[in-house]
């Protein structure tokens, strides 16, 4: 029995050593798990901080773009209103100009008709005044010659039987 006892005792001893090793291994594993958990938490914390920083930067960039877009849209709307205002003013001025041009055109046409009428009357009066005049060709003229000098020259060349007198038209 001693041999069996010693065998049993050695198995128990072995079993006790294995249990102690299992216990040590379990405590080491727990310790390692705690270290690993701490490292993972630290890694995740750094990763999340980095991600949050990037997201914050993206949010700031998007906000800046949004502000810039709103500013640009406001400027565009202001420009559009200004353009419409200028366009409306230009259209109104062009309409006024066209009306004034039409008025001037009408006035010019009327003045042109009056000028033609006056020109016709002047031609008629000139022609009527010429009827009372005699035309002499070939009589030399001198510079600064008066009407009286011209009349005297004509009287010299005229035959003595011509009688020059005032005539009236009945």
Image (cartoon, rainbow, N blue to C red):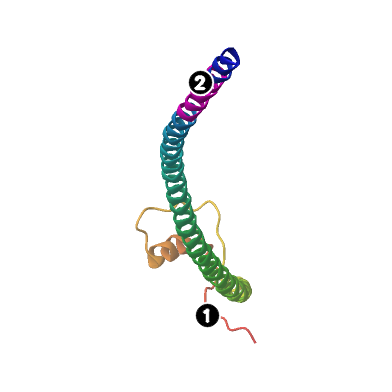
Where does the image place residue 39, in percent across and percent down from the top left?
42, 34
Left/right placement of residue 6 relative to residue 40 reads right
**Secondary structure of the residue carrying numbered label 1:** loop
Q: Residue furthest left?
A: 144
- Nearer-the-camera pick, 35 or 113: 35
Query: Which label sits on residue 131?
Result: none
**Secondary structure of the residue carrying numbered label 2:** helix
Query: Which label sits on residue 166?
Result: 1
Where does the image place residue 102, in percent across and percent down from the top left?
62, 73
Whether 64 is among the magenta residues is no
- Nearer-the-camera pick, 39 or 92: 39
**Crowd class of label 1 (few under 14; some 14 to 19; many from 20; radius 10 Å):** few
Q: Quadrant of the C terminus?
A: bottom right
Residue at label 2?
A: 13
Q: Residue furthest bottom?
A: 170
- Indicate whether 147 appears above or below 18: below
Whether 20 is among the magenta residues is yes
Q: In this rendering, which labeled residue sits more in front, label 1 or label 2?
A: 2
Distance (Cα) linking label 1 and label 2: 180 Å
Which range is magenta? 10-24
- Indicate whether 98 appears above or below 17: below
- Nearer-the-camera pick, 106 or 166: 106
Image point (51%, 21%), residue name: 13
**Residue 71 shows in this picture:** yes
């Amino acid at each position: 029995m001693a041999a069996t006892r010693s065998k049993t005792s050695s198995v128990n001893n072995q079993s006790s050593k294995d249990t102690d090793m299992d216990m040590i291994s379990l405590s080491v594993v727990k310790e390692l798990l705690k270290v690993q958990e701490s490292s993972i938490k630290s890694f995740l914390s750094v990763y999340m901080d980095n991600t949050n920083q990037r997201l914050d930067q993206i949010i700031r960039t998007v906000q800046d773009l949004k502000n810039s877009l709103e500013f640009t849209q406001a400027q565009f709307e202001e420009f559009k209103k200004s353009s419409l205002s200028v366009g409306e003013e230009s259209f109104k001025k062009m309409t006024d100009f066209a009306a004034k041009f039409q008025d001037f055109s009408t006035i010019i046409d009327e003045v042109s008709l009056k000028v033609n009428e006056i020109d016709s009357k002047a031609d008629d009066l000139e022609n009527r005044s010429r009827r009372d005049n005699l035309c002499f060709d070939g009589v030399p003229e001198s510079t600064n010659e008066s009407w009286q000098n011209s009349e005297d020259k004509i009287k010299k060349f005229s035959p003595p039987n011509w009688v020059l007198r005032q005539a009236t038209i009945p």
